[in-house]
């Protein structure tokens, strides 16, 4: 497919080779078909893919696009009664909610998830990064994802929430299984037991905290109130679930993609090693250059929307590519160039509008500590396999590798 072609065939963001080709495809779409119609998304037909920065910003703020699923999407996907109710319980969280419910839920959770709470975590995140590296540095090889980027955020979020240490491996298993199924709608039925057990576990944990409040986020969510309005029990489980799901794989990918980008750009790696104070702009550049979240989550048209000569019909699904918007040359000079000192970097890797990422300060802190600590402790490192052998995670929403083996 070349730029300037009139008809652009339907793009399939689920195709196994999509991630490798995506940036090339986005370039073509941004120029020739910025509101791209596709029939290839298995759970929704029709779907529109949005690729330009300006359109992404305006649609992320557009009240005509709703998060609430319009049709009986969930019922179509899961006919089993038990799964339906457990699934509905867990997924009825604020990222799937529209105002006014969204505004209420967001204010209540924001009261518990404060910037000060995040900043206080700095020394503990530093300890976790050092401990993870202690376990592997002597081997002169490690897997950047499995040994480092993956465990770090799950330990951090478990500690913030107050998940007991003895439950963490089980907890990690559930959260992985659910993330995987979320990205593979055709495989969702396989995780019925995981969903049911996870829901059950969360209910027991919240009940224990209600009896004995502690210094953790679950207790803070239980206590959070605004003018005597509180989160109900049935709102707390999905909120915990959202914090785990939204806060884990995303941060894994920030750390993994950031380190991978440095491996691919030794000059930038050297610069960051020699001038560690570039870490703030470097993190923003990693988020832009290789965005951890490829597409914003599902948004459905509540009414007809006309854009660039196309008509998005009521109930159509709109997928906004954050990865593409973040490489749009109208917003970012030399967008395919990694520059850890880039100024005026108004990327939308954390979204925009009312659903803007609640965990952005935490994600930035984890990313900074993880990447800087690794650069300090491992003076030289290189990929120990060919680039072509790296496998993408099997998810359409996210961008990140399953494994990045290095030697040093
Ligand atoms: C929402 C990205 C880390 C919690 C979002 C959205 C994006 C995003 C793009 C908006 C999705 C949409 O509008 O469809 C990221 C990235 C992260 C990250 C790139 C890491 C680099 C975290 C962390 C947490 C978190 C660490 C918390 C522990 C949330 C929550 C929402 C959200 C609760 C929903 C906000 C709402 O609906 O109002 N995130 N996220 N995220 N994120 Fe993050």
Image: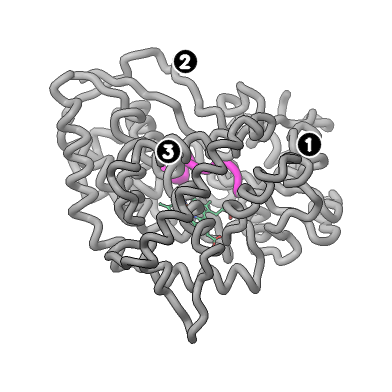
Front position among marks 3 and 2: 3
For marks 1 and 2 on the same chain, the one whose residue lies earlier in the sequence: 1
The residue nearer to you, when weighing 164 against 115, is: 164
Under 8 Å from ligand 1: the CB of mark 3? yes
The C terminus lies in quadrant: top left
At mark 2, the secondary structure is: helix
Q: Residues within 10 Å of mark 2 (few under 14, many from 20)?
A: few
- Residue in view at x 64 percent, y 34 percent: 188
Q: Residues within 10 Å of mark 1 (few under 14, many from 20)?
A: some
- Residue in view at x 86 percent, y 52 percent: 313
Q: Which residues are magenta?
A: 286-296
From the image, tell me which residue sits under label 2.
388
The residue nearer to you, when weighing 69 against 264, is: 69
The magenta stretch spans residue 90 = no
Q: Residues within 10 Å of mark 3 (few under 14, many from 20)?
A: many
For marks 3 and 2 on the same chain, the one whose residue lies earlier in the sequence: 3
**Label 1 to label 3, Cα distance in Å?**
27 Å
384 with respect to 24 (left or right): left
The residue nearer to you, when weighing 243 against 122, is: 243
- Residue 210 appears at what percent x and percent y? 39, 67
**Label 1 to label 2, Cα distance in Å?**
28 Å
- Residue in view at x 70 percent, y 37 percent: 29
Q: Main secondary structure of the magenta part?
A: loop
Quadrant for residue 139, please give it: top left
Q: Does any portion of residue 237 appear in the rendered image?
A: yes
From the image, tell me which residue sits under label 3.
253
From the image, tell me which residue sits under label 1.
38
At mark 1, the secondary structure is: strand
Under 8 Å from ligand 1: the CB of mark 1? no
Q: Does any portion of residue 25 appear in the rendered image?
A: no
322 with respect to 262 (left or right): right
């Amino acid at each position: 497919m070349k730029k300037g072609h009139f008809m652009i065939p339907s793009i399939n963001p689920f195709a196994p080779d999509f991630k490798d080709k995506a940036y090339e495809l986005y370039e073509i779409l941004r120029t020739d078909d910025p509101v791209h119609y596709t029939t290839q998304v298995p759970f929704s037909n029709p779907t529109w893919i949005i690729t330009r920065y300006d359109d992404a910003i305006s649609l992320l703020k557009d009240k005509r696009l709703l998060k609430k699923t319009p049709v009986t999407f969930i019922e179509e996907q899961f006919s089993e009664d038990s799964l339906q109710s457990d699934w509905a319980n867990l997924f009825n969280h604020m990222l799937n909610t529209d105002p006014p419910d969204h505004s209420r839920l967001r204010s209540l959770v924001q009261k518990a998830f404060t910037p000060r709470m995040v900043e206080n975590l700095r020394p503990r995140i530093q300890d976790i990064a050092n401990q993870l590296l202690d376990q592997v540095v002597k081997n002169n090889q490690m897997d950047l994802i499995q040994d480092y980027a993956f465990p770090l955020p799950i330990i951090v979020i478990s500690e913030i929430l107050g998940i007991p240490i003895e439950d963490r491996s089980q907890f990690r298993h559930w959260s992985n299984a659910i993330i995987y199924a979320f990205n593979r709608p055709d495989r969702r039925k396989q995780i019925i037991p995981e969903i049911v057990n996870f829901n059950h576990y969360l209910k027991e944990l919240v009940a224990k905290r209600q009896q004995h409040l502690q210094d953790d986020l679950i207790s803070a969510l239980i206590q959070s109130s605004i003018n005597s309005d509180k989160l109900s029990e049935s709102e707390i489980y999905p909120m915990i679930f959202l914090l785990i799901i939204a806060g884990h794989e995303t941060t894994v990918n920030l750390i993994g993609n950031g380190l991978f980008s440095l491996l691919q750009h030794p000059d930038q790696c050297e610069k960051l090693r020699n001038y560690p104070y570039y870490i703030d702009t470097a993190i923003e550049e990693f988020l832009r250059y290789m965005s951890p979240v490829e597409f914003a989550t599902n948004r459905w048209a509540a009414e007809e929307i006309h854009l660039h000569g196309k008509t998005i019909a009521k109930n159509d699904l709109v997928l906004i590519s954050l990865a593409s918007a973040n490489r749009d040359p109208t917003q970012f000079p030399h967008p395919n160039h990694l520059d850890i000192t880039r100024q005026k970097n108004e990327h939308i890797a954390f979204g925009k509008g009312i659903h803007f990422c609640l965990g952005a300060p935490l994600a930035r802190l984890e990313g900074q500590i993880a990447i800087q600590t690794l650069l300090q402790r491992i003076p030289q490192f290189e990929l120990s396999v060919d680039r072509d052998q790296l496998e993408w995670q099997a998810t359409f929403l996210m961008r990140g590798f399953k494994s990045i083996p290095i030697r040093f």
